[in-house]
Image (spheres, rainbow, N blue to C red):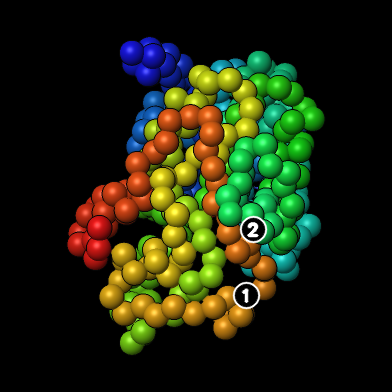
Amino acid sequence: MVVAKIKVTMQQNDHRTIILGANGMLGHAFQIVCPQALFFGREVDITDEAGIRSLFRRLQPSLVINAAAYTDVDGCEDHSEHAFLVNGEGPGYIAGACRETGASLVHFSTDYIFDGDKEGYLESDPPHPINTYGQSKLLGEERIRETFDDYRIVRISWLFGPDGRNFVDTMLRLSKEQETVRVVDDQVGRPTYTRDLAAKVLLLADEAPGIYHVTNEGTCSWFEFARHIIPNVLPCTSDEIHRKAKRPRCSVLLNTKTAPLRHWKEALAEYLTLLGREPRER
Ligand SMILES: NC(=O)c1ccc[n+]([C@@H]2O[C@H](COP(=O)([O-])OP(=O)(O)OC[C@H]3O[C@@H](n4cnc5c(N)ncnc54)[C@H](OP(=O)(O)O)[C@@H]3O)[C@@H](O)[C@H]2O)c1
């Protein structure tokens, strides 16, 4: 009953909803679940404070959803200045323009703001990032929170879905190219389907401001995830695979505030079907 009411509100407001980062993987999911919104890709640079302000003044949005970010986790180690500008200052500029025009903001943060030493992280747990990407995303959270109150910061993890670089597509490609694919079995998290997430976020926009953890249900290692995608996969440890950025051992986001999404295995099965593939295990 309540959900139905919220859906009506969102439909009425769609024409005043702006989606930034519309050509990214998550941005594309919003094009499916919220087609009446106004979508902006790279032509709106979130590090251009004056440009963002002038766009919002002109369009007078009631809701802004920011899916733009610099998401190359290893690249952030080499290009930290750029990472802090896009992932840290950019969200602050967007929040400032929202405050000026009276818009609410939904912004995405990451499981990588945590160090991975706990078995799971509550919305209230203190962040402690161990790589530059996580540090830059945490700065983005801080810039928003110091600018105004009308935000929903949605922390998410391990995204997969159409129209973007993601683990599922990478596994399918490597499975064809290599005899066996080695995948780490000592990093644990929660895979999340972009379309489930985007639909949920539209409902969250009408919930109380604050920080939310939203993922599909169920926890697994990258290896366990891969096992449900391809047959020729073997486990390995993080030490065996050299990556520039350190990854948290456990980055499970615990959602204590909203109704849970379905299990990742169900969501993965839907995505594989969309790709014309059979899920390997249920
Ligand atoms: N993917 C994950 O597993 C994951 C996990 C946790 C959190 N997140 C967060 O979820 C959000 C969406 O991630 P995603 O996977 O959809 O990322 P994505 O596919 O990399 O999309 C991000 C988009 O932002 C654009 N962008 C980069 N710099 C920009 C700038 N200065 N101004 C405007 N646009 C800019 C990118 O354009 P170019 O491609 O042209 O650079 C890209 O289209 C991000 O906030 C990310 O940090 C993602």
Point out the tag, 1 or 2, that comes first from the N-terminus: 2
Above or below — where is 49 with respect to 268?
above
User: Can you tell which quarter of the image residue 62 is in?
Assistant: top right
Whether residue 251 sits left or right of residue 130 in the image: it is left
Judged by depth in the image, the label closer to the viewer, 1 or 2, is 2
Q: Residue furthest front?
A: 119
Residue 146 pos. (x, y %): 79, 30
Query: Which residue is at a point 72% across and 55% down the rendered structure image?
Result: 129
Determine which residue is flagged by label 1. 243
Res 39 visible: yes
Look at the image and tell me in which quarter the N terminus lies.
Answer: top left
The residue shown at (52%, 24%) is: 205
State the residue at coordinates (62%, 23%). 209
Neighbour tally class for label 1: few under 14, some 14-19, many 20 plus, Cα within 10 Å:
few
Which of these two is toward me, 243 or 247?
A: 247
Q: Secondary structure at mark 2?
A: loop
The extreme bottom residue here reads: 179
Residue type at tag 2: Gly
On residue 116, which mark appears?
2
Rendered image quadrant of residue 79:
bottom right
Residue density around tag 2, few if under 14, some if 14–19, many if 20 or more, within 10 Å: many
Looking at the image, do the residues carrying marks 1 and 2 touch, with CB atoms under 8 Å apart? no
Q: Position of residue 48 (x, y in %)?
A: 72, 40
Hey, what amino acid is under mark 1?
Arg
